[in-house]
Amino acid sequence: MYNMEKQHKLGKLHALERICMLLDEDSFREIGSNITNLEDAFNIKKGQFPYDGVITGYGTIGGQKVVIYSEDFTVIGGTLGKQHGFKIANAIKMAIENRCPVIGINDSGGARIQEGVNALAGYGEIFYYNTMASGYIPQISIIAGNCAGGAVYSPGITDFIFVIDNISQMFVTGPKVIKSVTNEDITAEALGGANVHASKSGVAHFHMPDEKECFKRVRELISIIPPCYEEGYLHSNVPTLPKYNSNVSFSESLAHVIPEHSNQSYDIHDVITGIVDDGSFLEVQEEFARNVVVGFGRIKGIAIGIVADQPKYMAGVLDCDSSDKAARFIRYCDSFNIPIITLTDVPGFLPGKDQEYKGIIRHGAKLLYAYSEATTIKINIILRKAYGGAYIAMSSKHLRADFVYAWPTAEIAVMGAEGAADILYGKQMKELSQEERAAFRQEKIDEYNQKFMNPNVAAMHGYVDEIIKPEATRERIYGDIQLLSEKRPLDQIAKKHGNIPL
């Protein structure tokens, strides 16, 4: 019944093999195995294609129930006809009703041309249920082959997309269409291969070397994210959470992470490692917009989301792509009540005409919107620089962070001292000799640093709750999460929804 060899010759696993490798052993139960195509057209007969080219059912991953579907490229290229589409839509509906994740393994040439508008109807049903499921249950897409035309939009709506080297391909219009319309020659791999979507387009969230490693990472993701939306619930892998004042320990590794000079870089992963449980950090979109790091981790068993500026890349500055990346992740965490821990070290938004033309105003507004709208637990640690509008955007008190802490190394101001001195005293310095100008400028820089570039001013106004020692950060976050675990907003505006800047 299953043409395993045809897939193996392409260097790929069969749809059924993929399901069995991903799920717990012997846990898969198929649903809809007798459904076939219903259309007679273009030499296609009713009932010609077994299970209409997609295997659907349910099983478990690490004991967690999941609904799954896997397209079979050996059956008319995995193309989607009406029955195929309705099977997938029904699987998503089943996952919604049973409050569990849905996983789609995509390997399809797109709409089945022979079925005409009925194929498009199948896609429409899928898109509708993708949207219904969004923010209620996790949706995971694995691109395990071709994914062209309408087939890319369902993964595009889902929460996480996995791509695999030398296997995954995603594009709305393929190389042949591009050649006919624009006369441009490009290979399928260069147009929509795994590397393209992991590092350039930002469409993919996880980039894996092969199918086996991909399924392993999916299992890891399922183990850390909540299976569904549940109000006032902390997702933990321990039966009883220890009290925040018991077994207190300090992360000594954090004491010397920040370099002595503010213009020196460091790797934010060193800070993350000092905060989360050993080996628990799972980075999302690792290769895209690397000036911001996002991902999941645990603190004493509690699942958290982390949004962190990365000084190692572009000095941690915010640009269009990093704003989108962070905003999307914040909204996912908020949908499932995952506490958001923000690690701030940001010199500002990236200046320049390229960013302005690309719409940095619009993209940066997404980040402001996402943090402002989020009602999950929000804790911000200002590590070093927090300048200008980027200070506000990175989960500031003004956007209603629950707690904002600062390390003693924090610099909170409109801009750096050098830039401030040049703007404030530029006219005066023009009238001085070169030697006098240098001395005067340094004096004003020191004065600005003393008055404005430390966390005490922000703490005095209540914009920073406490100035804490770096090594106490993990314990402070854990205690706060316990306190805030059942928080409820005091005020709620009655409206249908806001209008996010897209």
Image (tube, rainbow, N blue to C red):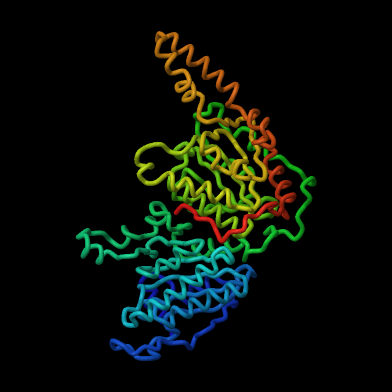
Quadrant in which the C terminus appears: bottom left
Q: Nearer the viewer, residue 500 or 157?
A: 500
Q: Nearer the viewer, residue 485 or 248?
A: 485
Q: How many marks?
A: 0
Q: Is residue 110 visible?
A: yes
From the top left corner, tell me how far across and down residue 354 is, in percent: 35, 41
From the top left corner, tell me how far across and down residue 32 is, in percent: 51, 85
Q: Nearer the viewer, residue 440 or 247?
A: 440
Q: Residue at x 60, y 52 (%)?
A: 374
Is 304 left or right of 288, judged from the image as shown? Answer: right
Is 337 placed above or below 365 here?
below
Q: Residue furthest front?
A: 494
Is 8 placed above or below 51 here?
above
From the top left corner, tell me how far across and down residue 334 is, in percent: 60, 56
Is 239 left or right of 384, judged from the image as shown? Answer: right
Quadrant in which the N terminus appears: bottom left
Quarter assignment of residue 473: top right
Q: Residue at x 45, y 9 (%)?
A: 436
Q: Is residue 272 visible?
A: no
From the top left corner, tell me how far across and down residue 218 is, in percent: 54, 63
Is 434 placed above or below 22 here?
above
Q: Nearer the viewer, residue 134 or 101?
A: 134
